[in-house]
Amino acid sequence: MTVDQFPPDRIFRDQPLRTGGPGGTYNDMERVAALEAHMEHVRDDVRDIKDALTRIEDKLGDKASSREVANWSLAGIGIGLALFAATIGVIAIAVTVWGPTP
């Protein structure tokens, strides 16, 4: 159910309240019954909202935080630099061992 299907002020907006004498539009029990029906719709909507929030929380709980992403990125950069340095070291050793003789 959407908000447009049951606007909250539709029930009583155009109907004057009874002021203690006969001739009012609603008697007390009709008014109470209408309010109870309206509250059922409100409860259903609140339940739907709670369910949606629970699903959102579950989805967000599965995602990595920005700190975790930053840590993994820095670790990847560090490993990349270490591999680069090791490669340069191996090349330097190979050049000195098998390099041209003077």
Image (cartoon, helix red, strand yellow):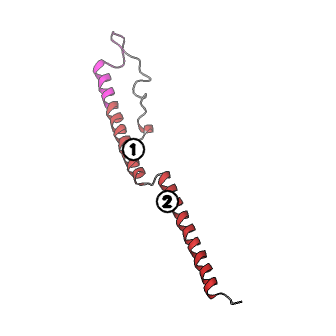
The residue under the point 33% across, 31% down is 39
Q: Position of residue 92 (x, y in %)?
A: 62, 79
**SS state under label 1:** helix
* Residue 94 location, quadrant: bottom right
The type of residue carrying mark 1 is Leu
Which residue occupies the foreground of this view, 36 or 76? 76
Numbered circles on residues, count? 2
Name the kind of residue labelled 2 in the image: Trp
Residue 80 sits above or below residue 67 on the image: below
Number of the front mark, 2 or 1: 2
Q: Which residue is mark 1?
A: 53
Q: Report the disc number at residue 72.
A: 2
List the single residue furthest toward the top.
Answer: 21
Q: Residue at the left extreme?
A: 29
Report if residue 32 lies within the magenta region. yes
* Residue 91 left/right relative to 15: right
- Which residue in the rendered view is the most extreme toward the right? 102
Q: How far separated are the C-alphas under marks 2 and 1?
A: 29 Å
> Which residue occupies 43% across, 37% down?
3
| Residue at 68 percent of width and 90 percent of height | 101
Pick the residue in front: 1 or 77: 77
Category of crowding for the residue at label 2, using alpha-carbon neighbours closer than 10 angstroms: few (below 14), some (14–19), many (at least 20): few
Label 1 CA crowd tier, 10 Å (few <14, some 14–19, many 20+): few
Locate the C terminus by quadrant. Answer: bottom right
Residue 38 quadrant = top left
Image spot of residue 62 (x, y percent): 40, 54
Element class at badge 2? helix
- Residue span colored magenta: 18-37
Q: Nearer the viewer, residue 68 or 22?
A: 68
Q: Is residue 4 left or right of residue 95?
A: left
Residue in the foreground of this view, choosing between 71 and 98? 98
Eyeballing the image, is 49 above or below 98?
A: above
